[in-house]
Structure formats: structure tokens, C-alpha cells
Image: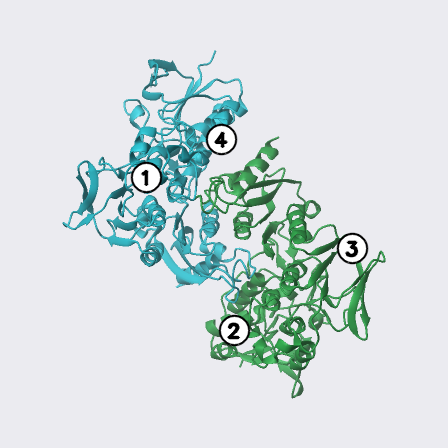
Chain colours: A green, B cyan
């Protein structure tokens, strides 16, 4: 009898693999080990749970416990895989009942990523949080809620939350001033979430703009918009450490010596892939530090797969391995690996580096190579243009400025990246750019795309077409 | 000296050609003959002017008279070209100062299309309108406005409107019941516009669904939504004639004998290309009845170009000539022809048949080949699937059902068409499908697209990806 498929990690990639495999090959035994209690939850929804737009923690679950059972998945919560022996084909597991060895036929490493808190010292103080996981999201909302209005049961946690921690935060007085360290996705989304609780929000960003991966043409309007919405932006400000008083955050200190008093700190300085369990195995890591995989998600070791935030993927523009830990990639790769293990070799799909984020009322999107230095490193000679056009016909109510940047390679004329920012349906338009990138289109081909036009939805020339026209003109110079 | 470039028609295609040509080759003489007084206006905005969301007629002009002057375009309004002699390279013109022959070096036929009113007899009655041109739009709004509130000057017409006609309609009592004949773009958009004036709206559609070119998956929700919004839909109802009383519409009669009393009628039964001026010339028409052109917009006669609603274009899915008279195609082809005449041969671009329309709160989109019979005629073996998915993460406020249909060719797996309908950012998502069609992607490639995901804008699997997954599964069966 074949040993079971062992999946390490019960979130997007792991459970997608388990679900697809159990559907395609119901007779194959599948065991999922998850070291925490939460499985299959939407990381990306945490800021909206904290904001209060999403009421219950369980609303963020993609699969309920019942659905997992129905799919015949043997899910073991609070079981941590602490080692892998790829010769013996076993994993070492620490569970509530003790430690044991579990043989596997195929292994799927879907251990995800963790929020980094280094190099910010003091991140372990009370009321200092990274937002990565439902326990921290619940704790922040507990702290924001006035004690008289707080009840653990209102969190809708299905019994999974760390009730002791949230009860402790629920009993504290809500913060008046929040310091957000880092202006990436988490920082920008948390600024909106905390502002909704009438907290005085300060955001510290080391570089001169938030959302650096979106480029200057998005970053500048975001700076303006965050300031309009009352966020106190500290740009070019490197936070050295959080400072505390009696074990709780009381403020922070920048490397230049500037300080801020704050009674809540959110640290969002990036994530790191969880690759420890394969560190002493022949499973190779890529240059990014995440696990290297082929187009089927298989690692350098036969029968060992990796998917999701712990694994690389290949970039459709550069053709090179790339580490962009995002939700769709994890779901898609998990699903493809499930199918491959079931017997139908399935490509996990490349990534275009597509990402969107909401910054209060601004919709921001990016895809491909936006940064000139990154494009040059990949061997391109980047030419870029930025335009601003209306989101609808100028005469139609609700038309709003939409700024599009497109980047092309000078020699080939090929589109290699783009970004977008605006308040009216801007984010979804990045999909046009992502699709053109995956199609390997030139800017001339993008200019001739037959995109939708109707006054309520788009001007005759969609903003993406306007940008392509202008960039194509520049390429002809 | 070279004879001037003569452009027949001063709307999207004609003025785009003139503008581009005058910019690329400022020394070349360009004359635009326009038989009416209005030039460069947005047909697609007329329902919103009638509704009252757009205040003034001049808001619908893409180029003001001053802008046209600035571009050095010699525009002759109220000059009708009544004949073309391609041997002598002259056009015969009837103008306010009499008739004359105008020699041309290159000729651009941009005569547009006209609203058909046949076979609906009685369309010449008072208070019976086709919506094609600002004069008819102004007349309908004049009729809808109570006489005590009506003033010709409020129309913001810059002196161009038929003031006598609008004054006459402005003096009439507003209608109580409107009969819309035809459930295409005009019919559906006019239902919304008339409803805003508290008119009792009846819409008559010959087939079983409005918007037949969008397919059943869009048509059915549109039926439901129009009815929810109080539109009285008469489906499978063929209107035989409008009936009148003392020269004004008083109702209509269907071929089956059913009748309706109505004091306003809108006839929107399609458009026909204006090709009369080339009828007795060697300029060839295509099977559609519109003017046949090559990839540069040139007709079968050297130096004679055609663009916009009077001309065909080539369909990117079938590779065959196709007649889809829409705004972007006209602008793009005019611009390309201007550039070609100026010396840089420029492809007009193909069409994907992309179209979007707003039906009250429903956003509808389509691209490529949606209809099975049409796909079969083009030599494909169509397989299609329809799915409904959320527009945002399920837990995020504002998520709404979005229905996507994708159509593929069974043998090649190539995507050949698609449609979409929903209330939340549905229309713009058709651009993903249009771009994939132009890229010649298979459904498998669409399934692996790295589309944007963030809870406020899209679920992890964008509705287009969900449809691709399901259709790809069906193709594998």
C-alpha cells in the first residue's frame, strides 16, 4: 500500500492541494498537519476584520470544519512538523499526544510565511503586533474595542481563538495613538482600519513613499490621499525600536533620534518564508530564500512539492524564479499539485506579480516589472510613460482621474510592466495589463486592444489604451 | 501640388483621421465635409443627456469648434457629399453656397451609420424617435420636460440644434407612456432614461430576450432586473406599426394584433451603414453591406479609405471581416488612417466584438463569439460554461453576484468568446476576456492568469478564472 500524501500546513496552498487531490483520487489517503488551530483563513481579510467591516473571525474562513470533513481530509490541528527525512520519506511530528514519525508517499510543503518583526526591537511588547494570523487580528480588535463593549464571544471564533490573550486585550483601555511601522500592504490597510476607530494614526516608512513595489506614480497619490485622510505620514523615517513602559508599548524611536508616543504599534515590515523544516534536507532553496520548484511545484527532491508563501514561482515576464507570496498563487499552486499527485501533471502557472491594494478610497494596482532597476537587472532596457485619463466619459457622473504607468522594453517593444491608481474601478483594470503581460504582447498590440467602451464604465479610449498610445509614441522616437 | 485629403463625415472616425493627419503632416491640406451641423459628438452619451445626467448638448462634444480650428482642420458643416468619382478623384458636394466638385488626393469615407426605422411603419409620426444624433436627443428631452420648465437655451446647444423642432416638442405636454421598440443597446439605455422621468415604460423585443448579442446568460438577468425596476417587458412581441392620431403617435400594434396606447415611441431596431456615396463606384462592399477595407483601412480602390460605422473591420477571433459599429473602432481606425496617409503605414487594429452596456444597475459585457450558431458558422466547435461567483471576497461588504460565460473551441481549447453580467465592477472585467481573445489564449492559459486579488476588489479566484476552471474541466471530459 502506498504511504499517504502528507501536507504540511492547513492554509490556502495546503488545503487547496488536499481538496483537489481528494476529489481527483478519493482512495488516496491524505493527512494535513497544521501547527495552529486556524486553517484555511483569509490573511488578506484581517485588516477589514480589525476595521469592523467583517464581523466575525469565522467569516474569514474559506472552508468550514464541516466542509473539510466532507472532503474526506484528515486534518490534524496543533500538529507541528519539525523535521523531514527525504531518504526515509518520513516527517517528524509534535502533536498534543506526543511526537511521532509519519511516513509519506508524497510530501507537500505548504508552511507559508511569517510576518517579520526584525530589525524592529521591542516588537514583543504588549500592544505591539504583526498582523499575520487570526489570533493577532482578534487581539488588535479586542484592544480597539472599549472594555465595556467587549465580549470574547462577539469575535465569532468557533472556539479557535487564543481566548486568554484577547480577553486580556479586551480589558485594556483603547489606544489613542497608533504607530504603524512599514508602508506596505499591511501598513496602508491598517491605517484605514485604525482610522475607523478614531485612533490617531502615524505611519513610518523607511523609503520616500509607501507601497514602493507600486512605483512612484502610485506612491505619490497615495501619500497625498493618506494625508488628506488624516494619516500622519513619516517618510524616509527608519524606526530603530519600539519603546515600552511596564511591558507595554509606549512609543518608538527612529534611528535619527526622533520619537513618538504611541499606545499601539503595528509592525508590517515584510514577511519571510517558513522553510525551516527543509533546511537540513536536500530540498533546495532559491536565491529568494524560498523553496525552489519546477513548473509542477516539485522541489529538487522527487515526490516533495512546495506551494504557497514558502515557495518560489516563475515570473512570466522574466522567466526567472520569483518569490511573490500572494493568495491566488498559493491556491492555484496547491490545486495544481493536488492534481499532479493524483496523476494528471498540471502546471502551477506563472506569476505576473499582479497585486492590488485599497488605500482608503484609492485603488492601487501593479503587475510585471514596474521598477526601472529591477527591469534592467532582468536584462531589459525599460522605457516608461505615465498618463492620467478619466475612468468614464468626461460628461458622465462619477468620472474620476485614473493614472496608468506602462513600462516596455525598448528593443522588443514588449510590455513588461504597469501600474494604476484611481478611485473609480481602477484596481480591476490592472487585469488588462496582467493578461497582456501573460500574452507577451507588445505595446503596439496593447494599443490596438478592443477594450470596452460605454460612458458609465470607460471613456472611448480606456486609460490603459491612452497609456499604450503615449508609450508607443515614445518607443517610436 | 497634391490635391487635399478629403474626409466625408465629421464624427469620430472622420475627425480622428483629420486630427492625426494634421498633427503628423501639418502641411497637407485636409477638408472635412459634414452634412449636418453637429460634429465630433458622443452618440453613446445621448441616453444620459435625455435622462438628465448630462446637462448640456455641448458636454457630448469630444472636440469644441475652437479645438478643431486649433488643429488646422478645414471643417465645412452642412456640406453633403453626394457622389464620388474615383477615376477623376473628385467628390460632388452640395453646400449652402451651391454644388461643386472637389478634387482629392486621398479620400476618407467616414459617413457613419443611420438608425433604421424600417420595418416599423409610422416611425415618421410626431413623438416617434430614433435616437441617433443630438437633434433627436434634444427633441426627446424637450418633450419630456414640462412646458413651463422648458427653455431651448437650457439645452446648451451652442446654436447648432434644430431650434424649431425642439421648441415645438418643448411646448407639448410630457408623455405618460412610452413604447420602446427594440431591446438592443438603445432600447435598454432608453428604458433607464425614460424611467427617470416617471414615464410608464414598455419595451417590445421581437426575440425572447433583450440584448440578444450578449447571449442568454446576460439576457435572463436583464429581463429580471428590468422587470424589478418597473419596465413592462413584451418579449417575443413583433411590432407591426406605430399608430397615430392627428399626426402624433398614439400607440402601436403588434403583428399578433396586440396593441398599446402610448404617447411617446422610441424605435431602436438597429443601424445601417451609410454607403450610398460609394454605391456607383468600384469601392467594394463586404457581405455585411458595409465598406470592405484592408488592415490599413484602405478600400478596394487605391487612395480611398473607409473608417467607422460605415466600414467593416476584421474580427480577431474569426480572422474574417466583420461589421461592429462602435465608438472605439471608429476612433482607432480614423487615427490609423490619418497616420497612414501621413506616411506611416498603420494597422487599424482588429475587433474582438467587445461591448458593454448599463441596464439600470446591471453592468453587461460581451466579447468574441458568444452565440453557438455564430461560432459554428465560423468553423468552431463551441463548448461553453456559465458560472456565478462573487465580485469581491464573500466576507467583504458590497460583494455581488457576477455571472461569467466563457466559450471555447473544443479541439484547440482556444477561448473564442465570453460574457459577463453583475452589479459590482462587472463591465470592466470583460477587458480581461477581450485581451485574452486578442492574445489567442487557450482556456488553460486563461485559467492560469495571475489576476488581481484583494478582498475589496475581487475574490481569490476572479469570476473570470472560476469560469475558465469550469470550462477547462468540461473540455477535459
Numbered mark located on residue B147 in the image: 1
Give the CA separation, mark 2 to mark 3: 41 Å
Residue drawn at x 52%, y 57% is: B448
Q: Residues within 10 Å of mark 1 (few under 14, many from 20)?
A: some
Give the CA separation, mark 1 to mark 3: 65 Å
Give the CA separation, mark 3 to mark 4: 50 Å
Q: Nearer the viewer, residue B47 or B215?
A: B47
Q: Position of residue A50 (x, y in %)?
A: 62, 68
Residue placed under numbered mark 4 in the picture: B346
Q: Residues within 10 Å of mark 4 (few under 14, many from 20)?
A: some
Q: Position of residue B57 (x, y in %)?
A: 41, 35
Residue placed under numbered mark 3 in the picture: A237
Residue B282 position by quadrant: top left
Residue B251 position by quadrant: top left
Residue A260 position by quadrant: bottom right
Chain of the residue that carries numbered disc 4 in the rendered image: B
Secondary structure type for disc 3 = loop
| Disc 2 with disc 4 on a shared chain | no
Residue placed under numbered mark 2 in the picture: A63
Q: Residues within 10 Å of mark 2 (few under 14, many from 20)?
A: some
Amino acid at each position: 500500500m502506498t504511504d499517504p500524501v502528507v501536507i504540511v500546513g492547513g492554509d490556502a496552498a495546503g488545503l487547496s492541494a488536499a481538496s483537489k487531490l481528494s476529489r481527483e483520487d478519493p482512495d488516496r489517503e491524505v493527512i494535513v498537519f497544521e501547527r495552529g488551530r486556524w486553517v484555511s483563513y483569509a490573511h488578506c481579510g484581517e485588516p477589514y476584520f480589525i476595521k469592523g467591516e467583517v464581523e466575525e473571525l469565522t467569516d474569514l474562513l474559506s472552508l468550514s470544519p464541516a466542509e473539510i470533513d466532507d472532503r474526506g481530509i484528515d486534518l490534524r490541528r496543533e500538529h507541528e512538523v519539525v523535521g523531514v527525512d527525504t531518504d526515509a520519506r518520513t516527517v517528524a511530528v509534535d502533536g498534543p499526544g506526543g511526537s511521532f514519525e509519519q511516513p509519506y508517499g508524497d510530501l507537500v510543503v505548504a508552511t507559508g510565511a511569517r510576518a517579520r518583526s526584525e530589525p524592529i526591537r521591542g516588537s514583543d511588547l504588549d500592544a505591539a503586533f504583526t498582523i499575520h494570523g487570526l489570533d493577532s487580528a482578534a487581539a488588535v480588535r479586542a484592544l480597539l474595542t472599549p472594555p465595556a463593549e467587549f465580549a470574547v464571544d462577539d469575535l465569532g471564533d468557533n472556539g479557535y481563538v487564543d481566548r486568554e490573550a484577547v480577553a486580556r486585550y479586551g480589558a485594556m483601555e483603547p489606544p489613542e495613538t497608533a504607530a504603524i511601522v512599514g508602508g506596505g500592504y499591511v501598513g496602508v490597510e491598517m491605517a484605514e482600519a485604525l482610522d475607523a476607530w478614531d485612533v490617531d494614526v502615524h505611519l513610518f516608512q523607511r523609503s520616500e513613499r509607501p507601497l514602493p513595489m507600486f512605483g512612484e506614480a502610485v506612491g505619490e497619490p497615495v501619500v497625498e490621499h493618506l494625508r488628506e485622510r488624516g494619516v500622519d505620514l513619516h517618510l524616509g523615517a527608519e524606526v530603530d525600536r519600539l519603546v515600552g513602559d511596564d511591558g507595554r508599548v509606549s512609543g518608538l524611536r527612529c534611528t535619527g533620534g526622533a520619537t513618538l508616543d504611541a499606545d499601539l504599534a503595528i509592525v508590517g515590515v515584510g514577511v519571510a518564508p517558513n522553510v525551516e523544516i527543509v533546511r537540513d534536507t536536500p530540498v533546495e532553496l532559491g536565491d529568494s530564500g524560498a523553496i525552489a520548484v519546477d513548473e509542477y511545484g516539485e522541489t529538487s527532491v522527487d515526490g516533495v512539492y512546495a506551494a504557497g508563501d514558502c515557495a518560489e514561482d516563475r515570473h512570466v515576464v522574466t522567466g526567472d524564479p520569483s518569490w511573490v507570496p500572494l493568495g491566488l498563487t498559493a491556491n492555484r499552486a496547491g490545486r495544481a499539485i493536488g492534481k499532479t499527485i493524483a496523476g494528471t501533471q498540471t502546471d502551477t502557472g506563472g506569476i505576473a506579480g499582479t497585486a492590488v491594494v485599497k488605500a482608503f478610497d484609492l485603488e492601487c494596482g501593479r503587475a510585471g516589472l514596474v521598477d526601472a532597476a529591477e527591469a534592467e537587472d532582468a536584462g531589459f532596457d525599460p522605457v516608461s510613460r505615465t498618463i492620467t485619463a478619466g475612468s468614464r466619459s468626461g460628461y458622465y457622473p462619477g468620472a474620476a482621474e485614473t493614472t496608468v504607468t506602462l513600462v516596455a522594453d525598448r528593443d522588443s517593444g514588449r510590455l513588461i510592466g504597469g501600474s494604476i491608481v484611481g478611485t473609480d474601478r481602477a484596481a480591476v483594470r490592472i487585469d488588462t495589463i496582467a493578461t497582456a503581460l501573460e500574452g507577451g504582447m507588445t505595446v503596439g498590440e496593447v494599443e490596438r486592444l478592443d477594450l470596452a467602451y460605454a460612458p458609465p464604465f470607460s471613456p472611448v479610449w480606456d486609460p490603459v489604451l491612452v497609456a499604450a498610445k503615449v508609450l508607443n509614441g515614445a518607443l517610436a522616437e
